[in-house]
Amino acid sequence: MAKKDGRKKRKPQETSLRHLLRVPGGERIDLTAYDASATPGGPADKAAGLAATAALAPRLADLQERLYAASTAGDRRRVLLVLQGMDTSGKGGTVKHVIGLFNPSGCRIRAFKAPTPEEQNHPFLWRIMKALPGPGEIGIFDRSHYEDVLIARVRELVPRSRLGRRYEEINLFEKSLADDGVTVVKVFLHISYEEQRSRLLERLDNPEKHWKFNLGDIEERGMWPAYQKAYEIALKRCTTDDAPWYLVPADRKWYRNWAISRLLLEHLEELDPTYPPGNFDVDESRRRLLAT
Amino acid sequence: MAKKDGRKKRKPQETSLRHLLRVPGGERIDLTAYDASATPGGPADKAAGLAATAALAPRLADLQERLYAASTAGDRRRVLLVLQGMDTSGKGGTVKHVIGLFNPSGCRIRAFKAPTPEEQNHPFLWRIMKALPGPGEIGIFDRSHYEDVLIARVRELVPRSRLGRRYEEINLFEKSLADDGVTVVKVFLHISYEEQRSRLLERLDNPEKHWKFNLGDIEERGMWPAYQKAYEIALKRCTTDDAPWYLVPADRKWYRNWAISRLLLEHLEELDPTYPPGNFDVDESRRRLLAT
């Protein structure tokens, strides 16, 4: 294939963003080896990135509508986007800018906070199960069951033996989702230690952002190495063929938004949902309707 | 007040869209007296309408963020938009085009279909209660508890005596919402009989829209007068100071989107939510952060 027309004719397996960002299985992961300000496979600069993301919007909206339409005829397929990342890594910004490109009626968004007393009375996957998207929907988790092997590990909220079993529980759970028609897209928003400082300072410098800040954020930041380690383990142990992890460098917000839009597009294109045929006689229906 | 600067200095009570579209209490309502293709208070034409709606987007998003931010400091206020109207009146289109202007993470959208067996095992307000927005959120009901006095009346799903009590139950329920900080904005999307025919024909003429059509739609259309009557009664009996009904002429989609955006804006501006102050020492926090 000639390189100059490669953008149009490329084979998805070879040059897709999924391929580029997918966390490889089996290997130990060293997050410090990944440049958080990189833009792999992405547009040349911010202006091009914003334009490219905007250009994806109609295709995303069209595929979403087809996915939803298909569900009305029994297609159980759906998508679940899982967003994880350190404080300020842009989980909320992704929902605003990427999920904002979709029809809100087909999106089921859930932000997971510290478990409520009721949630604590159940296994850690209980609240996750309740928030899953239905057929035809796009589910979005802002944090997820991975908190139960991240903060739970760093803060030692459960015994180490129980923690160890959770990775396998998560893999089996996600496999059951895949078996049920859920395309699971797990995104780790990778920011640098310096970028987090800069974003926290921005919140301090702007009184309209003070509500997003609390002193606990600095304390959590103090445990950065332990969190990075917990992420490395979670990424390694839970990147599977059924539900791979994607590592998205997230220091540049425009790249983050483009990359996640593009990842969703690639998954939706692979699903290739189609409008279902009607189960009625069109001419007869038209005749009856015109008679009213 | 001079007329030419009236647009900027107008008093909300005098010239607000809320005032113009609000269904008056106490009086018998005759829907045939309302022109569904009218554009009361609206822009001059479609192009101006689309531009005006787009121009509202930043203000809506800003007020939504303030509302959400305020909730993190204990402000319980929130908004509930209730959308009702005949088939094809544009409930789904409103969610797509108007609610699409907001940050999806702060929107809690629920489309009510025919009650499930579990829902039927409970009083009609049970499923409504479960779908209410939390503090700081904007809730959107695509259909609502009003179906229980609309289709329930037309199809005689419950004895007339029980139906009669429901209007009062609804008023008390909505009063309890208002008491709890919920701004209830109830919108009746008013389309004409001819416009509905034309929109149903469009669905038949476009195979990509066949999934939105079913034969039952023609049967329901056959009961148009009974539905209009049921709406007239519901609007009359349930337009209250706590939760007034707004009648939005909806034959013109651009006007519908503008009017509902504008109604939401007026209510959000009245709430006037403000960013809460931080509960921390900014300088001390900055110093600690810079030391990391």
Image (cartoon, coloured by chain):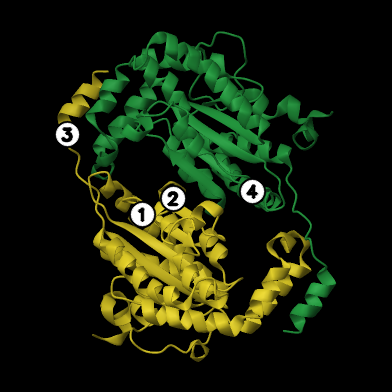
Chain colours: A green, B yellow
Which residue in the structure is indicated by mark 4? Answer: A64
Can you identify the residue that label 2 sits on?
Answer: B103
Mark 1 chain: B
SS at badge 3? loop
Q: Chain of mark 2?
A: B
Q: Is residue B39 visible?
A: no
The answer to whether the residue labelled 4 contacts the one labelled 3, judged by CB atoms less than 8 Å apart, is no
Report the amino acid beneath label 4. Answer: Gln
Classed neighbour count for the residue bearing mark 1: other residues with Cα under 10 Å, few (<14), some (14–19), many (≥20): many
Where is residue B12? Give x, y as percent. 28, 76
The answer to whether B205 is drawn above or below residue A251 in the figure is below
- The reply to whether discs 2 and 1 touch (Cβ–Cβ < 8 Å) is yes
Q: Is residue A213 above or below residue A37?
A: below
x and y percent of residue B120 in the render?
51, 57
Task: Kindly tell me whether residue B7 is visible in this rendering.
Answer: yes
* Of the image marks 3 and 1, the number of the one nearer the N terminus: 1
Number of numbered discs visible in the structure rendering: 4
Label 2, label 3: how far apart the Cα atoms are: 27 Å
Residue that numbered label 1 is attached to? B64
For mark 2, give the secondary structure. Answer: loop
The residue at 48%/63% (across/down) is B54
Query: Horizontal and vertical percent for residue B30?
Result: 47, 89
SS under mark 4 = helix
Q: Where is mark 3, residue-wise?
A: B280
